[in-house]
Amino acid sequence: LLLLSVICSPQNYPLYIRSVPTENELKFHYTVHTSLDVVDEKISAMGKALVDQRELYLGLLYPTEDYKVYGYVTNSKVKFVMVVDSSNTALRDNEIRSMFRKLHNSYTDIMCNPFYNPGDRIHSRAFDNMVNSMMMQVC
Amino acid sequence: ITEVCGAKRVGYFGPTQFYIALKLIAAAQSGFPVRIESIKNELPLPRFMALKNDSEVHYGTPAELHGVKFQVPHATLEKNSYKRTDEGDKQEPKSPPMSPICSPPASPSTYQRIPLSYGYGKSRSGLEHQHGAPYEVRHSTHQQDGPSSGNYGAKPALASSTLNRSLSAEREQQDSSAHYSDDPWRITEEQRDYYINQFRSLQPDLNSFISGSVAKNFFTKSKLPIPELSHIWELSDVDCDGALTLPEFCAAFHLVVARKNGYQLPETLPETLLPEYLQAASLKPMRDCALFDSYSESLPGSQQTRDFSRTEKTSAEEVPDNPALLQDGKKDDKQALKVSTALKTIPKEFQHLTVKTAAQESNALKARPRSRSYSSTSIEDAMKKGEEPPTPPPRPQKSHSRASSLDLNKIFQQNTQAVRSGWLPPPPPALPPRPSVSQTEQVSEVELHPQMNRTPSQAEESSSAKKEVVLTQPPSKPARRKLRTEAQGLETPELSPTINVTSSLPAVKHHHPVQKQSSKQKRAIQTAIRKNKEANAVLARLNSELQQQLKEVHKERIALETQLEQLRPVTVL
């Protein structure tokens, strides 16, 4: 059950937040915020290697008993974070990867729009539709 | 009218009732009495323009309604044509709302407003409204009063004349507006021309892109809010490349225009604004339709679709390719299908068509696959043929390769050496490496016989027309070896496949039959056979070598891929 998708800018403020309505949304927001530290940690750990070799998909960032947090970072340090319900054991790593890939593709499509300034909040309807379909599909 | 068409009896206007009602209205407007028999007459389409406009005025969504002037004539024309086809669709959803309207409000306009607001669930964003509509509405309502009033007395079920009129009018209007709602997203010719001119002002080359920043500046001038412009861009930049091609630009501009005129932007791009649709639509009017049709006929369907999709992604590079491609197509049209004639005619017409270079591009693109297939050089073709020695069908192609080698013979005998010389290079490299062709000759002769038997029929067919000659040139080449004089007579002229079908061909044809038939046929046949066999063997060997190379390349590729896979996990955290 995909609970939350967040896209964060290189400066670690959110560009896009989309969540399935639950009562503990704020808790998930907080979790994502803390997991950004983990992301930075992973990025800096690989910093010694060349940037090319760095894998974009960061994998499981932070598992708790209720949910798992997955991360993905682009080459421009834009971070995608996803919170997934732990009860959904059917979700495999590949599926998470493909979801991140879709997110990344949609994000680049938004970038192509000359009316979008990098660093703005993302208001694209097409992007919303894509994320919605993705979250629904997982659910 | 309502009673006559049966709606009263049924209780609603089904498709049939609607059609009959419209026919009756047309009859009434033409002065015929309102009776079933009137339908049988040849009637002009009923005039609903005014009514439609009126309904649309009120039909509009809360957004402000400004008329888009160019669409006025276009839409009204379309309305009438649409009416017949689409009436049925909108009938059913309309019928429920009709019943609540039974109580007659004062004016027809209010009637229209009411059903429109809740009746037409399918309505898109607001409709365009013709400026002259209101005046015409009153006029036409008077018109309608005439035929409908006569029936009012006979329809106690229906509340009033105005109700009848408005009901039918609404239905028609709703139907037409249902159709008409398609129109806002359809680009008219005037609009298209305007957009193209705007495109030219930004980017003189019609086949190239407008970059994102240029487009952003341009559309920002329209004073629409940035989020809306962003949405428009998302809708129109279908391939998401940050640049607008001509059809994408037209779609974007059209959306801007529509938004400025009060239409809400759709969530997804309407079908009529898709680049493929616009590209196809733009090609048709831009060009001589007959030319296009003949062109398309000569092309395989797959090539056409491929070309259309390619024309979407046209870039500046393709424009200079045009003349080169056309020339290539001409030169390489050795394989001689009627395409060659089409190719010849089309380039000429290209010069006449300066309106849309995209049209040229599509033609060039079409020429490209064709020329590619033909310019593949006789070696490639012969290779394919070399693969299929046992099966009879490929033999005509084989004859092609043979023909190329045979051309060497003919070249010295015929006048058009210059053209044929283009084919000289391919065969000679093939021949020298194979000195031991004589061994294969015997084998080849066996193959030749069945071919020869087959070719006579082909040769005979080819004699009929010039085009057919060109067409059957490849298959008729083996016929050269036939001992039948007729075939030989036809073969030799058909050996000139490289040249586009020109008027010189028939003349050449005439010479050769006389010469060939009189000269030493057997010797020519045998040399031809030998040469063909040589070429065959060479090509077969080439084929096997290339296949081996292909296998090696495949292996390399697999090895590289495995290496890549191995390297990847190293970087995983």
Image (cartoon, grey):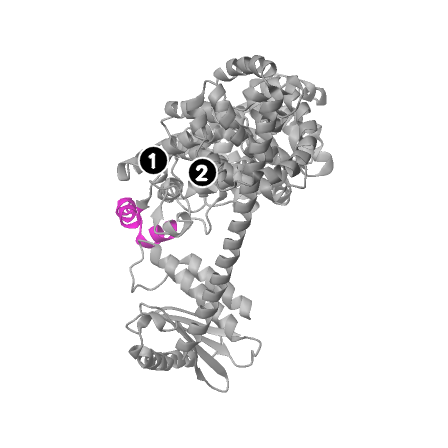
Q: Are the residues tagged 1 and 2 within 8 Å (C-beta)?
A: no
Instruction: In this rendered view, identify the residue nearer to me: B106 or B458.
Output: B458
Q: Is residue B220 magenta?
A: yes
Alpha carbon distance from label 1 to label 2: 23 Å
Instruction: Tell me if I can see residue A24 in this picture.
Output: no
Q: Which quadrant of the view contains residue B320?
A: top left
Residue type of the residue flagged with mark 1: Pro
- The answer to whether residue B6 is left or right of residue B478 is right
Helix, strand or loop for the magenta stretch, by majority: helix
- The answer to whether residue B251 is left or right of residue B215 is right
Instruction: In this rendered view, identify the residue nearer to me: A90 or B43.
Output: A90
Residue found at the very far bottom of the displayed protein: A65
> Residue A93 placed where, x, y %?
51, 75
Q: Is residue A65 above or below residue B513?
A: below
- Which range is magenta? B211-232
Q: Chain of mark 1?
A: B
Query: Which residue carries the number 1 mark?
Result: B320
Query: Which residue carries the number 2 mark?
Result: B278
Q: Chain of mark 2?
A: B
Residue type of the residue flagged with mark 2: Leu
- The answer to whether residue A92 is left or right of residue A112 is right
> Residue B50 placed where, x, y %?
49, 28
